[in-house]
Amino acid sequence: MIPGAINGYEYMYHIDFGDFLKAKIWLNAFTQAAWSSGAGWGMFHVYFIYASKDEDIELNAFTVCFGDMVAAMLAAMVVIPAVFALSSDPMSIMKSGANGLTFVNLVNLFSHTTGGFIMAAMFFIALFSAALSSVIAMVELGCRNLMDMGFSRAKGTLLTAAFFLIVGSYSALDNRVFENQDMVWGVALLVVGLLYCIAAMKIGVEKLWVEDIKPCSDIHVKWMWTLIRFFPVVFTIVFGWWIWEAASWYPGEWFKFWPITKYQYTPGVMVVEWALLFLILFLLNGTMSKRLVHSNKVD
Amino acid sequence: MKLWVVNMIVCIILGFGSFFWALKTTVAAEAKKKAKKA
């Protein structure tokens, strides 16, 4: 092991019990899981279209979540010790956040390390492959919806890619916008999860288990599925706690939202951005539902 | 043993253990399905 690398492991696995009392830590963990596993995105809609009817839902969910976690842990166990071993000031690198670490400090580190060019090439090829595999499902999510509305695959792909390009460019050009978007839509993924959960409870958690999940499941861990009932409670606690804590970061200004480069994390900016999307979708709802009904010939 | 070392071991065992168990179960289930079809 390279000298100093052990400090990276210590940094990774060190437990600060005070962190358990911070709402942001819980919210970050919550949103990370929703982002990373693709649950909040509703990517399972895409996967289900192409999966066979007897595909094991529970086992797949289990494999995806733990696979995602293991891959992230493995990557961190390679990158963080390397930063601690090769850098003279590793703590400043770690404090620069995910973007600063990946696109600024790691590049600097590789350029000052023997064989760094090869390491950098391998690292960024791996990162690009990981991003590409996620983007395929993300584009398909938008494209598939457009196809259901009667668009061709080519048009659907182009429209989705253009949407990503236009909306994503602001985040690519300014890291403060990126941080804001990461937080606002990260938390929105939890709201989407809440909506799915409410839908499951409306249909019937037991009914879904008996009719849809159990017949095509090999592991039959019912308690894991029924945990969905607790999601609204967990969501309310974590989200409410975070709103209360975020308001304290901006005393007297928690409701402000403009410019978003200044009010990146206010509850105000989050509500305004969600409301904007809601308004756009509300206005488009009639057109979208007509196209869906017309294209799929449903009553 | 230091707390962070214990935490590291627990994370590795739980994380990798659960993943490989799920993977093993998936492979076994797929083999069963294939055998049924054949």
Image: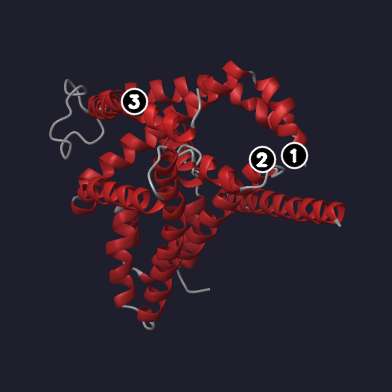
In the orientation shown, which residue stands out farthest toward the top? A202
Does A86 sit above or below residue A223?
Answer: below
Element under disc 1: loop
Find disc 1 in the rendering and name its residue: A217
Name the residue: 44% across, 55% down: A136
Name the residue: 33% across, 21% down: A244
Find disc 3 in the rendering and name its residue: A285
Is residue A121 in sight in this rendering? Answer: yes
Q: Mark 1 lies on which chain?
A: A
Between discs 2 and 3, the one toward the N terminus: 2
**Which three-letter amino acid code belongs to the residue tagged 2?**
Ile
CA neighbours of label 1 inside 10 A, class few (<14), some (14 to 19), many (20+): some
**Which three-letter amino acid code belongs to the residue tagged 3?**
Asn
Q: Is residue A247 left or right of residue A55?
A: left
Q: Mark 2 lies on which chain?
A: A
Q: Mark 3 lies on which chain?
A: A
Find disc 2 in the rendering and name its residue: A57
Q: Is residue A143 left or right of residue A262?
A: right
In the orientation shown, which residue stands out farthest toward the left? A259
Query: Disc 2 and disc 1: Cα gap in Å?
Result: 6 Å
Does B29 sit above or below residue A238?
Answer: below
Element under disc 2: helix
* Res. A279 mark: none
CA neighbours of label 3 inside 10 A, class few (<14), some (14 to 19), many (20+): few
Between discs 3 and 1, the one toward the N terminus: 1
Q: At which x and y percent is residue A245?
A: 33, 25
Q: At which x and y percent is residue A298?
A: 50, 27
Query: Disc 2 and disc 3: Cα gap in Å?
Result: 30 Å
- Nearest the viewer among A271 and A277 is A277
Q: Is residue A106 left or right of residue A254?
A: right
**Which three-letter amino acid code belongs to the residue tagged 1?**
Ser
